[in-house]
Amino acid sequence: MQPTDVRDPEYFHKVVDCQWACPAHTPVPEYIRLIAAKRYADAYMINWHSNVFPGVLGRTCDRPCEPACRRGRVEEAPVAICRLKRVAADYKGDVRSRMPAPAAQHNGKSVALVGAGPASLTVARDLAPLGYRCVVFDGDRRAGGMIRSQIPRFRLPEAVIDEEVGYIVELGIEMRLGTRVESLKSLLGEGFDAVFIGSGAPRGRDLPIPGRQEAAANIHIGIDWLSSVSFGHIDKVGKRVIVLGGGNTAMDCCRTARRLGGEDVKVIVRSGFEEMKASPWEKEDALGEDIPILNWMVPKEFTHQNGKLTGVIFEKVKAERGADGRRKLVPTGEPDQHVPADDVLVAVGQENAFPWIERDAGIAFDRWGMPVVDEVTMGSSHKQVFFGGDAAFGPKNIIWAVAHGHQAAISIDKLCQGEDVRDRPPPMVTLASQKMGIHEWSYDNDVSPDHRYKVPHQDKAVALRDITSEVELGYDDRLAFKEAERCLNCDVQTVFAPKLCIECDACVDICPVDCISFTANGEEADLRGRLNAPAANLTQPLYVADGLRTGRVMAKDEDVCLHCGLCAERCPTGAWDMQRFLYDMAQAGHACRSH
Amino acid sequence: MTFLPKPKLHHPALGHNALGYTRRDYEGAISTLCAGCGHDSISAAIVRACFELDLPPHRIAKLSGIGCSSKTPTYFLGASHGFNSVHGRMPSVLTGANLANRELIYLGVSGDGDSASIGIGQFAHAMRRSVNMVYIVENNGVYGLTKGQFSATSDKGAKSKRGVVNSDEPIDMVGMALQLGATFVARSFSGDKAQLVPLIEAAIRHQGAAFIDCISPCVAFNNHEGSTKSYDFVRDHNQAVNALDVIEGREEITVDYAPGTVEMVQQHDGSWLRLRKLADEYDVHDRVAAMDYMHRRHAAGEIVTGLLYVDPAPHDLHGMLHTVDAPFNALDDAALVPGAAALEKINAGLR
């Protein structure tokens, strides 16, 4: 193998699995260390800088970081990264003085942002301090988008939304709430230098099966129903409720129904339990609130009597692999099952809708009705129009919306400054030794043996009585410290200097996970097979260094390295060093212009 | 060294042996030796050998004297019996333990100071008596604990860290072991586990006095230019006479090698040693030729390593003393104190 080029920032970035997996590339281990040090405000600001809504995300994020977490590969469960983020938000105190000030003067450029959700607000946050005039339009009277309309209050208190949306609005954003944009052409006609479309995926998919029209009064589209609950238009539901669908919206629907009078609430899903789109923890929470999840049942018909819904008929199915290798649902042949119900909530997916974008406005759409959007620049076929969040590539989640927002802000800034939008600014990278003494490092390298700590929950009876009562109570500072200590500090990199190595094997002998080998070089597949422990996880790189006196190479499998630093402590010559790697994504602004 | 215990977390694919243990289960406490010490590599090799041989840790006794090397039994086989004896007295304590309980596996760990200076007499007699043990000398040619004076195995002409040249003749532990009747003699290098681990395994399987002289660089005091026990010097002058594999039980042992290049030796316990010859004409069964070869190669500036001599049918101390098969510590009072009549009978036989 070619020796690894560790000067390429992406190499060590990939070793920080959580940060690499995060769409916004939040420096996770960095803020977790600050939480362990009780520097909650500092931890919050690192988050705020990169993901804009730490308090919201600390409760609602899809957490792509956690399945990626290295800890999950060496013991049972990853670090509770998401809930630690909430700790930073809960205990930060007053951080208003740390927030950027509104721009002292406008730079003469103005940007229209369609939708007041996380994508648009991210763009506004990045651009407003640079002097851009940002005008946000939203049909709802309150800002936040789906964060406010679709996420139930028992998962996300209103105060958290108000606070974090407030930090952005206070940057001098012009909020035109209650103003639905009806025409892109007329918006462009208002003289904006750029338009960002972060209008989400606002349309819930319907289920056009027999009985849908007749029983319409008791059949509700999930996201619309959630939004009506959020804005106080709906405050009760029937005793027997069926929720159709297996995603996170279905989980929010069923748990909301439990709080509005639903006593017998069931989630009924076409697929199996494992295949459901909902996050495992959301399914767990629903089951914990006595909501059964029934699988392999396809709705066939709504039954009704005198214009009132009486239930749903389901066909039992099983999964089979077709000749083309694709999985298909086929009937099992068992008799159909009628499940009685007073209300049905349909949460079978969301769709994008752009009725307000004229087809001759210069935006190219693909055959699925989605705008053609560049995945790097977030630009559309119209040079001044950018997309982000669910509006760009269909329903994703908040953290993706934030990531899109940052990139779109860079593009808009470059467009307005007459630069090439395709020329993307590099990240800011620091790599610095953490050695303080013979056995002293500036990070806690003593690996905690603890298993993941559960987040305390509100008493169930209390939680189900009040829809605004937050179910998760969050870690207290003691639990937060212990959970934070589980972090392996993957951003403190093992950096190897072959010139200093005397090949004494001390690092090989001490490594608790056998990830270091000294051996003859070879092709990657061959090398992976003959290391001290087989490097079978092909998604994780080998760190290969040559230039050793014996002509062998040092090959380190990054896969399960604990970053405990024992290799460096045992190294007699300092050939191994533990160096903190900080990777800071570029954002819109002058810093990137200087590159 | 480090202050932290080694994390218990291990590689998810870490294997188990026939007893259900992982290699990590054979480790001991965290080493307090200097970073880079060869002794730690030898400890790791012992851990691997015991894991691979499926040895029950509670059937092993590790004994040592005094010195850096003699500290190491704390750092491996944490679930085994241990005895840290007086300086240079490991062999006699081990001999006693072996007489009391012949069923344990005895691992004597010593250094060049412990065995070639203060304990040289003990070393010599343990070899002569064919005590069934593995005797490992972790040989770094220097007194590390007292800051780097030449030891008795330092080569004549070797330079100390401060530049002083050694004027004394070295004691050749391998030569002595051969001369005194050890039935398994090997030399290896802490930096070469591929060679060292099978040698330790074969030595454990050997039912007699098995001696391994393991060169183990002292990074703090003897790893400089001019040293003959440094990593670089040993790597540059290492001449292995053979490469060894230990094959357990009755598994298929026919492997295609060019004729005359491989020799199979069955040990007394049934295990096989497969020796791939690296030096032509080297006969691992000829004690006298081995001594001659050692001296000649040493004179030529080479460090000969590998399995140097093995007697596949060794006698051990118990055999020579005609002791009973049961370990002494398992004999009951009736067997140990047969009574006045039996004494009378013995006395009568001596009149």
Image (cartoon, helix red, strand yellow):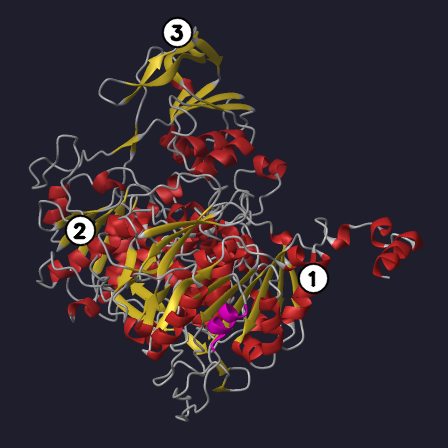
Amino acid carrying mark 3 in the image: Gly
For the residues beneath circles 2 and 1, the answer to whether they share a chain is: no
Amino acid carrying mark 2 in the image: Val
Answer few, some or many: residues within 10 Å of disc 1's Cα (few below 14, many 20 plus, some between 14 and 19).
Answer: some
To which residue does mark 1 refer?
Answer: B97
Image vertical order of residue A525 relative to residue B107, above or below: above
Q: Which residue is located at x 69 percent, y 62 percent?
A: B97
Instruction: Provide the secondary structure element on which disc 3 rests.
Output: loop
For the residues beneath circles 3 and 2, the answer to whether they share a chain is: yes
Residue B76 position, x and y percent, is: 56, 62
State the quadrant of the C terminus of chain B.
bottom right
Is A87 magenta? The answer is no
Closest to the observer, A531 or A191 = A531
Q: What chain is tagged by disc 1?
A: B
In the rendered image, which quarter is residue B347 located in? bottom right
To which residue does mark 3 refer?
Answer: A333
To which residue does mark 2 refer?
Answer: A376
Closest to the observer, A335 or B73 = B73
Image vertical order of residue A108 relative to residue A301, above or below: below
> Magenta region: which residues?
B172-180
Q: Main secondary structure of the magenta part?
A: helix
